[in-house]
Amino acid sequence: MSALGDIPIHVEPSAEKSVGREFGVGLGAILSELATLLEALRSTGEEGAIDLRSLPLGPNDLDRLRRLLGSGEVDIRIDANGESRIRETAVSGLWWTEHRNAAGEPLAVLIEVARVPNILLTADDDLARGAVRLRTVASAQFSAPGETPHGTT
Amino acid sequence: MARPDTELTIGELLDRNGVSRRSFIKYCTAMASLLALPPLAARAMAAQLRAARRPSVIYLSFQECTGCLESLTRSFAPTVENLIFNVISLDYDDTLMAAAGAQAEQARAQAMEANYGKYLLVVDGAVPTADGGVYHCAAGRSGLDILSECAKGAAAIVAVGTCASFGGLPFADPNPTGARAISSLVPGKPVVNVSGCPPIPEVIAGTLLQYVTTGRVPDLDEHLRPTVFYGNSIHDRCYRRPFYDRGEFAKTFDDEGARNGWCLYELGCKGPTTYNACATLKWNNAVSFPIQSGHPCLGCAEPDFWDRGSFYSPIPTARWGKAGEVSPAQAGTLAGVAALAGAAIGAGSVVLARKRINRNKRTKSHDSEKGNEE
């Protein structure tokens, strides 16, 4: 045998055909919960989320759900000890969020129901640290005698 | 002068190591998912964890195959290095630590003295008690002796794996070494059983993380297992459940039913009587679990799983009664129905599972008091 590709493969009919729409937990239930969460966001501003990894989903259910929700305009990549990807779905207010660790392995997959996912917002502590950092950079940059941020005197 | 690590909160340690807020929120989101908390609980969890201090952990191994520790080292969330460096202070583990011999034993003694009454004791393996415990000796002492000494000053004990939880393979008939479960040997101490052969890596790590986050032993079922991971049967959460409900079963490993992914009940699947998180957390970073790979559940997270007959025989009707918390008469009726039309028993076992969870809630406080009266 020279290569794996030389092994003939007979493809069995897809199991999905006999399973139909009831495979796994039922995507209808997820869509219904999303609709409730979206209504809560609209009426009270309360954010929500569904953790997709905690549900007993079948092998193809995640892909199917993703196709159902479609793609929106926003696609955000976060580099924080591994990549995170936050994609707006075709339904405004629903964000498909995937967190990965530094090795690229998936940590969490969820649908967030929010105007902007919380992880994107800058925290107060980070703002304070940012201000200190900026002052440090500025003072190092313009520390030469006679030099100011507005030019040389 | 910089404060020692043991005095720093986890948040201070993270800041010192340059771990950003977003990295930590992301980590907590994964943890909340693992602990079956609502996704938004990650924010509260992050705040609690940042304020906590890392507990000292002593890890002991007795009659075991090291599979449990191997499993823990393959935890993806949290990773074992994250757990060891950021969440706990692993002060003794004779397999993982660099020190050996007298140095290692000294490290254990120092950690126990410095953290008396506060450290977490993690144990894998059963402990042989026959003939004075001579069937397990380390550093010139019996396992029984070492366990007794370490248990005294422990705030809580986590028994990792089915051997530590219920005796496991060493306990199997005829049990020549007199192997016993940890909970039966440490009277008065709170014990958490994390069963499985081995347990799911994320379940071991998650149980430790939950203790650090909340500072207390989690809610437990009647076998002293955290309900967050062991609250549902494999069967209740199995993606093949609709086939069971319709009475569609694989009869052999290579028939049409097996190829179509039908229920493996008739091939001996122990999912209906096994409580674990395999069907949701899965294995190898959620890639698959035995049933998804076409093999019946062996029931490895339950007591006496080695002595319950063939792994490939369907569960006897009487067993349903034992695990499903119903009378043998009810179980017999339900199992009989299953062979004809799975729908009835499908609905029935969901009800039974709910009953069991409710009963656990009611008896939880009693269980935690009873703890080790085995």
Image (tube, helix red, strand yellow):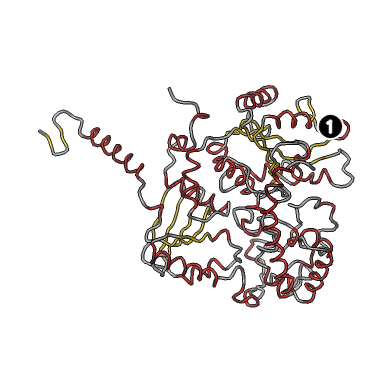
**Subunit of label 1:** B
Q: Residues within 10 Å of mark 1 (few under 14, many from 20)?
A: some
Find the residue positioned furthest to the left. Answer: A153
Is residue B256 at all visible to an observer of this figure? no
Quadrant in the picture for residue A1: bottom right
| x, y percent for residue A9 | 66, 70
Q: Looking at the image, which residue is at 61% across and 45% down? A: B205
Q: Nearer the viewer, residue B364 or B81?
A: B364
For mark 1, give the secondary structure.
helix
Name which quarter of the figure residue B308 lies in.
bottom right
| Spot occupied by residue A114 in the image (x, y as percentages of width and height) | 40, 61
Residue A61 pos. (x, y %):
56, 68
**According to the image, label 1 marks what residue?**
B133
Q: How many marks?
A: 1
Identity of the amino acid at label 1?
Gly
Coordinates of residue B320 in the picture (x, y in percent): 79, 62
State whether residue B117 is above or below residue B357.
Answer: above
Image quadrant containing the C terminus of chain A = top left
Horizontal side of B15 relative to B314 (left or right) equals left
Front residue (pair A119, A1): A119
Please say if B242 is above or below B14. Answer: below
Query: Quick check: B74 left or right of B312?
Result: left
B361 vs B320, left or right, is left
The answer to which image quadrant residue B140 occupies is top right
Indicate whether B30 appears above or below B63. Answer: below
Evaluate whether residue B225 shows in this view: yes
Residue at coordinates 46% horizontally, 44% vertically from top-left? Answer: B47
